[in-house]
Image (tube, rainbow, N blue to C red):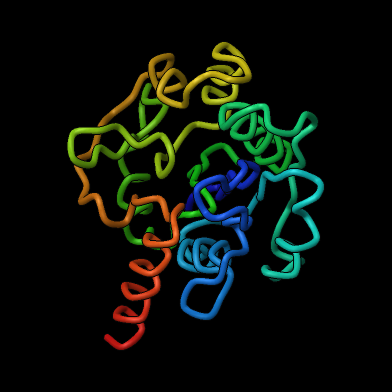
Amino acid sequence: MIGALVVVAGGRSRRLDGCDKAVAEVAGRPMIAHTVDRLASAVERTVVNCREDQRAAIADALPAPTVRFAIDPVPDAGPVAGMATGLAAADEAGADRAVVVGCDMPGLDAAVVSALATRLHGDVDAVVPVADGRRQPLGAVYRVDAARKACETVGDGGRLTAVLDRLDTVEATVPPGPFASVDTPDAVVRAARALGERTRQ
């Protein structure tokens, strides 16, 4: 199993009409609940990175005993800062490997990330999915210590792809669907439809 699931949830949901996308309803449940539940069987523990003002609503959406919160010390410092905060909490909990995802990735499942994790060996720091020719930092499986150092080097406000540039990576071609971010009203509708279809199968 992968040591930790790190969910980066601290961003502002500017394209989702001001609603916090972490707890936006998708197919009758908060989006973050889908994201966490679909990956739970592949990981030993879950870390949620968010702002302090999000914590109560996210805790209500998730089974609290199974989740460790990693609160942003400085809100709105960017996704690299959120990833670093989440990885630090995973490290403190004893995880040596982590899959890092956004809270808005309800299409990703345990089988996909488990397959990526099988390629994290030797000197490899991260296994990076590539969808439609684009590297996906969220959804990748990382060595926690190496990824933390890379985040620190990039610094707050940097791009997640810059973190990948500082790691020894292996790339894996994947279909784009599971790695799609659900961050607009239309995307919420599409995600709800897709999740409903999976439930009926």
x and y percentages locating residue 77 in the rendered image: 67, 27
Identity of the residue furthest to the top in this view: 153
Vertical order, 123 against 5 (above or below): above
Q: Which of the pair 123/199 is nearer the observer?
A: 199
Q: Quadrant of residue 32?
A: bottom right
Regarding residue 32, the answer to whether it shows in the image is: yes
Q: Quadrant of residue 62?
A: bottom right
Q: Residue drawn 43% across and 40% down? A: 138
x and y percentages locating residue 155 in the rendered image: 61, 15
Q: Residue drawn 31% across and 78% down? A: 198
Q: Which of the pair 71/6 is nearer the observer?
A: 71
Regarding residue 45, the answer to whether it shows in the image is: no
Q: Residue drawn 52% across and 54% down? A: 16
Q: Residue drawn 61% across and 47% down? A: 9
Identity of the residue furthest to the bottom in this view: 200
x and y percentages locating residue 147 in the rendered image: 52, 25
